[in-house]
Each structure stands twice: as C-alpha cells, then as structure tokens.
C-alpha cells in the first residue's frame, strides 16, 4: 500500500470514529415561574390610557434577561383575558390582553391556564384567553375551546432541539363557577389524569411535566393530599410535577417511585412556586421562585433523564417611577442583596424585608435538598455605571 493510500485510509477511519460520550449528549434547560396575577392595583399601575392601552413591560424588566437564557420558560397565567373592559382584580380576574404581549416580550414560551380563576369572565374569558395567548405565539394548555380541541392538542407536545416534551395541566376547582360549554377547563380527577398520562406515555416523549393547581393557600408546607397525588402521578410516569395556588413557596422534593412495569424512576416535585407577580400583601406572598430544570439525552441510545434543578428566589417590588406612579416589578433576590446594586434602588427597609422573607423559604428549600442558583447584577445588564 502506498503512503498516499495509507493516509487516505486513516482519514476515512477517523471520520468513522464514534463521537465521544460528551458529544453524544444533548442538553435542555427549562425555567418555571409561579402565579402571574392581575390584581386591580396592578391593572391601574400598567394603565397608559384606561380601558384602552396598558404597558406591563416594566413588570418583567429585571427577570427577562434570566428567562432568555433558557430553552423554554413556563408560567402559570392565573387570570383571564376577556378582550374588553371592565378589567378587574380579585375576586374575578379580568386583565387586558396587553399583559400577554408583555409576557411574550419578556421571554416566556409556554403558559398554563387551568386554575381556580379560569372561569372568572365566563365562556368569553376562557376562549379569548386561549386565542390571545396562542395568537402571541405561546404554547398553551390546560383550557380548551371544546372537546375536539382538547382531543387534538392534549397532552401538549413541544419539540425543542433534540427533545420531545409532554405537558399536562389541571386545577383543583374553579371557585364554584361552572365551565360553560363547549369550553373545557381541566380539573384534578385521578381517572382522567391517569388516562391522559397513558396517552402521554404512548407518544414516547423524553420527559413528562405535570402542572397542578393545588394545595392550601398561604401554607409554607405541602399537605398530605398533595403528597399522595404526587406519588400517584409519578408512578404513572411523570418526570416533574410543578405546583401552584398556595401563593407562597413550598418545598421541592425528589422521589423514587415504582412504575407500572415494576421499574423504578426518579421524579421531582415542586409543591408550590409561590407568586411571580401579584398585588397580594399577605406574609410571604411577595416572594416566589424561578426553578431551573435540566434535561440530558443520549443521542445514540435515545435515553433521557432529569439532570437536576436549582431555585432562584424572586421578589415583587413596588416603587414610584419617574412620573410618581406606583410600579410593580419582579426582581431576582440574589442580584439585589449584595454590595453592588443594579440601577433600581431599594430602601434599606425594603431590602431587609426582602431578605428576611427570602431566607425563610431558602431554609425550607435547602433543608429538602435544593440548591440555589445565584444571579449577579451583570446578568441583568443593569449594573450602575
């Protein structure tokens, strides 16, 4: 064999060498946030021209740079978008469509809409919320235009990179307001969830996420009903359960459950993310979480698994803007409690209140085995010059 032939042989051989184990792996990062509320004080704060034009972009200016770092950003939209005034807060949440636009601009990709306020503005509210959210390019699930719409689009499948993901969403109730036909609001019914989980598994996703509106309001620990339901859903094949409704943060826990085929599987349960933004003033309702969940997939074996999670406390801050008007905004706690502060200044009393509340939930989360991801001022792009 000539030298040129030998050289060609080795070049071909190198081209056929298998990829390294690291190169075989594909990774995905998701971020989940808590309740996106629309109290009357928030609506008034966002009003540029009452009943006509609203600007919610300042609400998310300090978290948008974080959301944009993730492959998928998911939130719980706990309000309705009826498409016309009157716009109202508690007890019937009716917010302007401009809020959805601000959430999309902030970096959100997926909104779940099954919660106890889903029927607050009747059939029009359910259908217009769906159409508005989808019209802005969001993935959306939990409520549906009719049974045919649910049959076609549920469980929701999202393709991202090399991953195929399934999302399911249910609420414990709708505050006694019945769902007007033909719309559908998913409610927690174990037989229905089990059937939906079976369909999800048949679709062979890389991971199944179940978002539940459940638990006791304002309680920092999950209840026994949550634990029992979580164990069942994990045993039916869910990889991650994300909770909302208590409006305060509850622990994040990892479980190993026996599946229906006798194998064991690790699962993650975030019992409650708390509020992301709201007008609530009860203790600990101004502190919520952003939670990062990592996925990894072997492109040769096509096996995937959850690689871990991290939490990031966020604080609902209210301040006076340059026009002297109250402004609601969500800020990452760790970026605002250090020595160098971003442009937005916090008073010492506000910073102390924020840190005290954050430290309470940090204690519960760390005790349960979770790790915090610290966010720097530089990541927000708002460091003082």
Image (cartoon, rainbow, N blue to C red):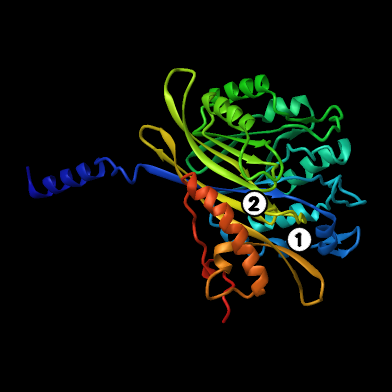
**At 81% across and 44% down in the image, what residue appears?**
80
Residue 71 in view (yes/no): no
Residue 75 in view (yes/no): yes
Which of the 4 image quarters holds residue 319?
A: bottom right
Which of the 4 image quarters holds residue 148?
A: top right
- x and y percentages locating residue 341 in the rendered image: 57, 74
Quick check: 241 above or below 374? above
Q: Quadrant of the N terminus?
A: top left
Gap in Å between the C-alphas at discs 2 and 1? 14 Å
- x and y percentages locating residue 219 in the rendered image: 67, 43
> Which residue, as the protein is rendered here, is positioned at the far left?
1
Tag 1 or tag 2, which sits nearer the N-term? 1
- In this picture, residue 68 sits left or right of residue 85: left
Please tell me how crowded label 2 is: few (under 14), some (14-19), or many (20+) other residues with Cα within 10 Å.
many
Q: Nearer the viewer, residue 183 or 152?
A: 183
> Which residue, as the protein is rendered here, is positioned at the far bottom?
385
Tell me the SS state at disc 2.
Answer: loop
Q: Which mark identifies residue 331?
A: none
- In this picture, residue 36 sits left or right of residue 25: right
Which of the 4 image quarters holds residue 323?
A: bottom right
- In this picture, residue 104 sits left or right of residue 250: right
- x and y percentages locating residue 239 in the rendered image: 51, 33
**At 48% across and 33% down in the image, what residue appears?**
255
Quick check: 372 above or below 382? above
Mark 2 lies on residue: 108
Tell me the SS state at disc 1.
Answer: loop
Q: Nearer the viewer, residue 186 or 213?
A: 213
- In this picture, residue 138 sits left or right of residue 55: left
Q: Which mark identifies residue 56?
A: 1
Q: Quadrant of the C terminus?
A: bottom right
- x and y percentages locating residue 111 in the rendered image: 68, 44
Please tell me how crowded label 1 is: few (under 14), some (14-19), or many (20+) other residues with Cα within 10 Å.
many
């Amino acid at each position: 064999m000539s030298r040129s032939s030998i050289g060609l042989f080795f070049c071909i051989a190198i081209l056929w060498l298998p990829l390294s184990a690291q190169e075989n792996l594909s990774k995905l990062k998701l971020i989940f946030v808590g309740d996106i509320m629309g109290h009357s004080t928030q609506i008034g704060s966002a009003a540029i021209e009452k009943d006509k034009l609203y600007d919610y972009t300042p609400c998310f200016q300090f978290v948008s740079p974080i959301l944009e770092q993730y492959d998928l950003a998911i939130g719980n939209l706990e309000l309705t978008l009826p498409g016309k005034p009157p716009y109202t807060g508690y007890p019937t949440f009716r917010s302007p469509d401009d809020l959805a636009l601000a959430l999309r601009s902030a970096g959100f990709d997926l909104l779940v809409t099954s919660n106890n306020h889903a029927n607050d503005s009747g059939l029009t509210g359910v259908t217009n919320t769906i159409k508005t959210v989808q019209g802005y390019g969001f993935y959306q699930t939990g409520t549906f235009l009719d049974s045919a719409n649910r049959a076609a689009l549920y469980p929701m499948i999202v393709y991202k990179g090399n991953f195929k993901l399934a999302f399911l969403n249910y609420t414990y109730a709708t505050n006694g307001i019945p769902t007007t036909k033909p719309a559908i609001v998913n409610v927690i019914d174990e037989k229905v969830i089990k059937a939906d989980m079976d369909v999800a598994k048949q679709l062979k996703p890389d991971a199944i996420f179940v978002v539940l509106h459940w638990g006791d309001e304002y309680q920092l620990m999950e209840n026994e009903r949550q634990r029992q339901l979580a164990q069942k859903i994990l045993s039916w094949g869910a990889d991650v359960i994300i909770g909302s409704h208590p409006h305060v943060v509850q622990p994040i826990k990892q479980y190993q459950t026996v599946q229906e085929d006798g194998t064991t599987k690790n699962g993650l349960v975030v019992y409650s993310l708390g509020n992301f933004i709201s007008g609530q003033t009860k203790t600990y309702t101004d502190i919520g979480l952003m939670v990062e969940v990592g996925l990894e997939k072997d492109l040769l074996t096509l096996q995937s698994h959850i690689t871990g999670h991290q939490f990031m406390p966020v604080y609902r801050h209210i301040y006076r803007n340059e026009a002297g008007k109250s402004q609601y905004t969500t800020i990452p706690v760790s970026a605002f409690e250090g020595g160098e502060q971003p442009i937005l200044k916090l008073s010492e009393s506000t910073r102390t209140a924020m840190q005290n509340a954050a430290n309470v939930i940090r204690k519960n989360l760390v005790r349960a085995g979770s790790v915090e991801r610290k966010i720097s001022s530089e990541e927000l792009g708002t460091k003082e010059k």
